[in-house]
Image: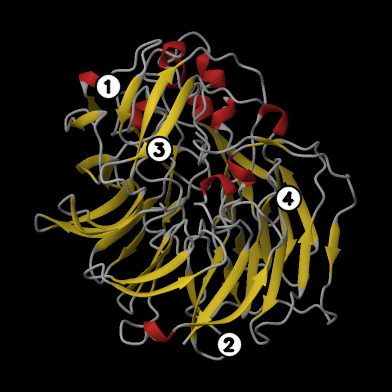
């Protein structure tokens, strides 16, 4: 669907005044260009094009991480979930907030001082019907000195990174149809690529490419519909049957028009192959009786040419997706050795509970394995790539199923995994949640929830709600695992210092040994952590760690309060 759905309260926002764009200089000083990035900064939402979230910095290490201390903080004033992470470019830190979106710029030469500027545009739309706490998962930067900021109701804005002035704006979503902007944009050369949310509203998902300098739309690729709309030639796709217009023919009637397939997840890129990789969300509604068929191309992975959007290959991971599992989670580019053979791999931890090691040149699935409690399917058929459903959990109209694992949140939610080439391990923030699931009829109204199921989420085996694990994608095995009682919503960071950082919903930021999973350090943040830690080299040459604390109130354990706070740590 569009991200975190279960245990999320849909909130009708109070309308706020439509004002002129507010751009305020909070500390008086002349505007100056942002210098070019230096090694060790964090210039893309995922840290690098491959989405490894791995840093080569080593100053913070196993031997000294216990001495990490808070150097400075900043409260955003927002009580919504703060997903994603800041960017660090040219000695400045850029921080974004959830809806209504604001962006702050900080001078790292003056740590702890107020922002250089704040960009806080008023929406030109009526207050949208907000899902999933109005999250915005990231902003992007271009060497021309632009920041790209998704506004939740549907606009994508280019901002001058030196002073916070708006440069151009492109209409990408449509709040009247429930198509919102919660995905992090990605810059690939001079092409800006961004997805949309709204699958839980029955919004038809798509990915869009823009000219990063002018904002001109270059292409748009839909998740459902004809091959021309999906930008897909089935005859050249090595990963799926070569039948035409499967994005239409695998749906009952015209269900593809309101079939979901949101593109809220992280986008990755292989420069050598010149391919971007992205997933699509599950189908809408959750009741499969209203959309009989495989429902392509929801719950799928795509490889596309970033200049044209044309699909090189596509593979559907969960046909029909009776429980609505998304395929939108990140796919990490990594060169692995499997059975003594080098492989250009793409590693994907799907919400359906299976981890996939894929040949990224052609989409062929090489290895699969369950990375946690999964009972709705027994395995993945190596010949077809389709999960083999367990008969006891077949979804039928009006039948209530109990104890389905994983829950609708997926075995892994939106919090991204990290990869360390030093250990050749992937570090995965995972859920340990199951559910009771009852399909119900769903009526479609544009811009309103189009769900089709009553879902109750419960802790999985052992009673804990979260798991943090290391995964060997060359063998499809778990190397080590940490149980978390309160659950996880944010992502992981791996470093060459032999450390992995992640946060928990009960407010702990932790560092563990990448080899063993042994906890080496923890810090209690002001709220639950739904964001992802980053690390960077400051202007003083020292290494720092940063994270934004603040999770959705519905996700927080008793005694933990909402509220966004940026925390920057150093030795």
Q: Is residue 166 visible?
A: yes
In the rendered structure, which disc, 4 or 1, sits on the residue that comes first in sequence? 4
Quadrant position of residue 495: bottom left
Q: Residues within 10 Å of mark 4 (few under 14, many from 20)?
A: some
- On the question of residue 60 being in view, the answer is no
Check the image and report above or below for 487 versus 109: above
Find the residue positioned furthest to the bottom.
Answer: 540
Q: Earlier in the sequence, mark 3 or mark 4?
A: 4
What is the x, y in percent for residue 89?
59, 74
Is residue 552 left or right of 169 when viewed as pictured? Answer: left
User: In front here: 36 or 219?
Assistant: 36
Which disc, if any, is residue 393?
1
Residue 196: x, y in percent?
Answer: 58, 40
- For disc 3, the marked residue is 327
How packed is label 3: few (under 14 Cα within 10 Å), some, or many (20 or more)?
A: many
Q: Which mark is residue 100?
A: 4
* Distance CA(mark 1)–CA(mark 2): 56 Å
Residue nearest the viewer, comparing 239 with 547: 547
Residue 96, percent from left and from top: 65, 60
Measure the C-alpha gap from mark 2 to mark 3.
39 Å
Q: What distance separates the C-alpha of mark 3 from that of mark 4?
A: 27 Å
- Residue that carries the numbered disc 2 in the rendered image: 539
């Amino acid at each position: 669907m569009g991200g975190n759905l279960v245990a999320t309260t849909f909130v009708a926002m109070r309308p706020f005044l439509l004002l002129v764009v507010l751009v305020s200089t909070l500390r008086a000083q002349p505007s100056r260009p942002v210098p070019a990035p230096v090694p060790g900064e964090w210039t893309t939402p995922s840290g690098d094009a491959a989405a490894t979230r791995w840093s080569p910095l080593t100053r913070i290490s196993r031997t000294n991480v216990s001495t990490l201390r808070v150097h400075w903080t900043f409260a955003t004033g927002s009580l919504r979930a703060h997903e994603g992470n800041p960017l660090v470019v040219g000695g400045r830190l850029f921080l974004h907030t959830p809806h209504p979106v604001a962006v702050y710029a900080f001078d790292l030469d003056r740590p702890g001082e107020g922002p250089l500027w704040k960009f806080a545009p008023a929406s030109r739309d009526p207050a949208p019907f907000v899902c999933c706490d109005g999250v915005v998962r990231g902003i992007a930067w271009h060497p021309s000195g632009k920041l790209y900021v998704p506004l939740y109701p549907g606009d994508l804005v280019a901002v001058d990174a030196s002073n916070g002035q708006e440069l151009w704006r492109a209409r990408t979503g449509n709040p009247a149809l429930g198509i919102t902007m919660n995905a992090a944009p990605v810059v690939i050369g001079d092409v800006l690529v961004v997805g949309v949310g709204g699958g839980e509203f029955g919004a038809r998902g798509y990915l869009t490419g823009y000219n990063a300098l002018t904002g001109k739309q270059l292409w748009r690729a839909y998740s459902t519909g004809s091959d021309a709309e999906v930008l897909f030639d089935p005859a050249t796709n090595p990963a799926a049957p070569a039948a035409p217009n499967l994005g239409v023919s695998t749906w009952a009637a015209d269900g593809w028009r309101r079939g979901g397939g949101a593109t809220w997840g992280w986008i990755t890129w292989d420069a050598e192959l010149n391919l971007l990789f992205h997933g699509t969300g599950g189908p809408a509604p959750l009741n499969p009786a209203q959309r009989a068929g495989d429902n392509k191309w929801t719950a799928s992975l795509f490889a596309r040419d970033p200049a044209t959007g044309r699909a090189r290959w596509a593979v559907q991971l969960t046909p029909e997706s009776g429980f609505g599992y998304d395929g939108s989670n990140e796919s990490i580019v990594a060169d692995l050795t499997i059975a003594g053979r080098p492989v250009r791999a793409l590693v994907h931890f799907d919400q359906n509970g299976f981890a996939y090691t894929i040949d990224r040149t052609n989409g062929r699935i090489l290895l699969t394995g369950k990375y946690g409690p999964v009972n709705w399917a027994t395995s993945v058929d190596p010949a077809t790539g389709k999960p083999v459903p367990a008969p006891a959990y077949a979804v039928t109209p009006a039948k209530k199923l109990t104890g389905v694992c994983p829950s609708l949140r997926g075995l892994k939610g939106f919090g991204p995994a990290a990869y360390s080439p030093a250990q050749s391990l992937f570090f995965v923030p995972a859920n340990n949640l199951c559910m009771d699931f009852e399909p119900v009829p769903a009526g479609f109204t544009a811009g309103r929830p189009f769900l089709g199921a009553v879902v109750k989420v419960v802790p999985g085996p052992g009673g804990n709600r979260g798991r943090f694990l290391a995964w060997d994608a060359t063998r499809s095995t778990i190397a080590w695992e940490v149980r978390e009682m309160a659950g996880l919503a944010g992502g992981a960071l791996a470093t060459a210092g032999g450390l992995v950082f992640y946060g928990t919903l009960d407010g702990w930021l932790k560092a563990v040994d990448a080899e063993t999973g042994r906890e080496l350090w923890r810090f209690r943040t002001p709220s639950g952590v739904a964001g992802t830690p980053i690390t960077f080299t400051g202007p003083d040459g020292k290494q720092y760690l940063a994270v934004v604390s603040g999770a959705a109130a519905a996700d927080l354990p008793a005694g933990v309060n909402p509220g966004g706070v940026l925390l920057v740590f150093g030795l």
